[in-house]
Amino acid sequence: MPLDRIIGTVKHSILEIILFTLCLYLAFQADGFFSTQNLFNVLRNVSMQGIIAFGMTMVIISGEIDLSVGSAVAFSGCLTAYLVRYLTGATIGLSMPIAIPAAILVALATGYSLGSLTGYIRIRFQVPTFITTLALMTALTGAAQLITNGFPITPFPEWYNFLGGGYVLGIPFPALVFIAVFLLTQLIMNHTTFGRSIYAVGGNIEAARLSGINIKAVKMRVMAIVACLAALSGVMQSAEIMSGTATTAKGWELDVISAVIIGGTSLLGGEGKIKGTLIGVIFLGVLVNGMTLLNISEYWQHVVRGLLILAAVLINRAQHANK
């Protein structure tokens, strides 16, 4: 293989190489890192944020961003809990096996609708999604507090915990959902007209319009998808902690965007891979888990993660500059 091809392969696989090196280091320095239980813990811990990250990748490739996903997680969990309490109350009187699926569907539909609205405002009024989702983040945080009145809502039966804390053949259920969402988004982005349209819109919106692509539909769909995935994570989060709590998922939007950036997606739009985001999500999960096992201060963990994000952006820019 020619030297320039080898160098090119290394440059485009740098994150995988760093991840492998990190795992190798932790295998010798952190007791229990490679135990089955710890690896499953890593997978469980990254699953709910990772599900959102795949949708966020589609959003950023299209040239947009969503800052409301953390608040959407908390709001969806609280909404699900509130609806379960309402539907099983004296007025409605539905049984839990009927009320919980109904509440979940409403939470997912609400997330999808809010995402579609954000995309519509972006196209109709030319308001950047940075602004609209920032406003939505604040509104959803307030709405979650209103629904719960500042106290966790806990009407769930024991079996509901399966959605956030259960296992299938020894594998955490959220991890299976994480893998399923990865495969689905990978299929959409690589093998569908819609996926190609997302790349086209993010790369050159005017050229995409002249090519006959429905810009409005693309923007609304990607914003709706990430909002719906955030709602799904909110439902699983409420199942894991067995309550609807307004203070959960704070700062998740930064973790999600970090994973997407570290995975190589360009913030300028038009470039990125779902597979890269998968590596980015796992890399962050391994890094946090490793630092915890090594008893590194939480304050230093934030410093390391911040520097890592900056390094990922610089590497990303360098790779694109050399194309």
Image (spheres, rainbow, N blue to C red):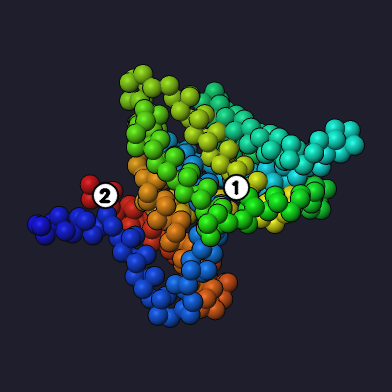
Q: Nearer the viewer, residue 46 or 321?
A: 46
* In this view, the mark in front (2 or 1): 1
Disc 1 designates what residue? 233
Q: CA distance from mark 2 to mark 1?
A: 36 Å
Residue at the far right: name it.
Answer: 90
Name the residue: 42% across, 50% down: 277
Q: Secondary structure at mark 2?
A: helix
- Residue 158 percent coordinates (x, y): 74, 54
> Is any part of residue 247 visible from this angle?
no
Q: Residues within 10 Å of mark 2 (few under 14, many from 20)?
A: few
Q: Nearer the viewer, residue 127 or 77?
A: 77
Q: Residues within 10 Å of mark 1 (few under 14, many from 20)?
A: many
Kind of residue indicated by mark 1: Ser
Name the residue: 51% across, 69% down: 38
Kind of residue indicated by mark 2: Ala
- Residue 2 percent coordinates (x, y): 9, 57
Disc 2 designates what residue? 321
Residue at the far front: name it.
Answer: 169
- Residue 142 percent coordinates (x, y): 74, 44
Q: Secondary structure at mark 1?
A: helix
